[in-house]
Amino acid sequence: MDVYSGELGARLSRLKYRDPPDWREVEPLAEAAAQFLRARVKVYQRGKLTSILPVPPSQPRRLQPIFVLADRLGEKTDLSVRFRYLIKTRETPPLRTLDDTRSRKRHLQGAFRVQDRSLAGKRVLLFDDVYRSGETLHEITRVLYKEGRVRAVYVLVLTKTAWRR
């Protein structure tokens, strides 16, 4: 299990890694993300963001925490959540097991595509639960610009994980 930073990291860890997951953590995590958007993200404040795009999960679960969090964030911010817009084209190893950047990049290259170009020219929020190296977010952002032809990508993550480069 990764070590996450701060109070939000502790909450996220209880949500993702307890058996059963502690679903009570969804509300405070989503509220923290919504408060951040309301207070600090000018493009949201101006009503220019159109959709939340949750990062496709790396491991299969019956109920995906990132999707539950994104859904709740969408409700709190009145933004649509496009759960299936980002498509994972193939399985990748759990990236938390890969410490070197080159390996992470190699495994992620070509691992994502977009559903269509329905968000072309739009400003979107890429939403993930954990930031580690940024390689996943970088690859998805590249795909959103190149294939999805979005106007702008804003990224929101709940916490970061400690690791050595």
Image: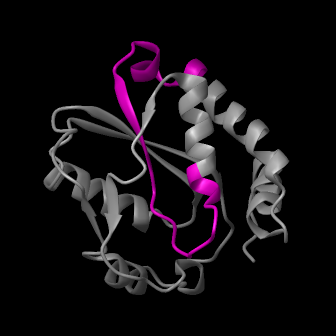
Which residue lies at the image location 41% right of the left edge and 58% below the top edge? 137
Question: In the picture, residue 21 is in which quadrant?
Answer: bottom right
Report the residue that reaches farthest toward the front: 62
Q: Nearer the viewer, residue 11 or 73?
A: 73
Question: In the picture, residue 76 is in which quadrant?
Answer: top right
In percent of width and height, residue 92 lies at: 43, 83
Which residue lies at the image location 41% right of the left edge and 82% below the top edge? 91
Magenta includes 147? no
Total count of labels: 0
In the picture provided, is 76 more to the left or to the right than 21?
left
Q: How is the image coloured?
A: one colour
**Quarter the N terminus occupies:** bottom right
In percent of width and height, residue 58 lies at: 51, 73
Which residue lies at the image location 42% right of the left edge and 80% below the top edge? 104
Q: Is residue 91 above or below residue 47?
A: below
Q: Is residue 106 above or below residue 47?
A: below
In percent of width and height, residue 78 lies at: 50, 22
In the picture provided, is 122 more to the left or to the right than 130?
left
Magenta includes 43? yes
Report the residue that reaches farthest toward the top: 46
Q: Is residue 78 above or below residue 153?
A: above
**Quarter the C terminus occupies:** bottom right
Give, as a single range, the part of the protein colored magenta.
38-67
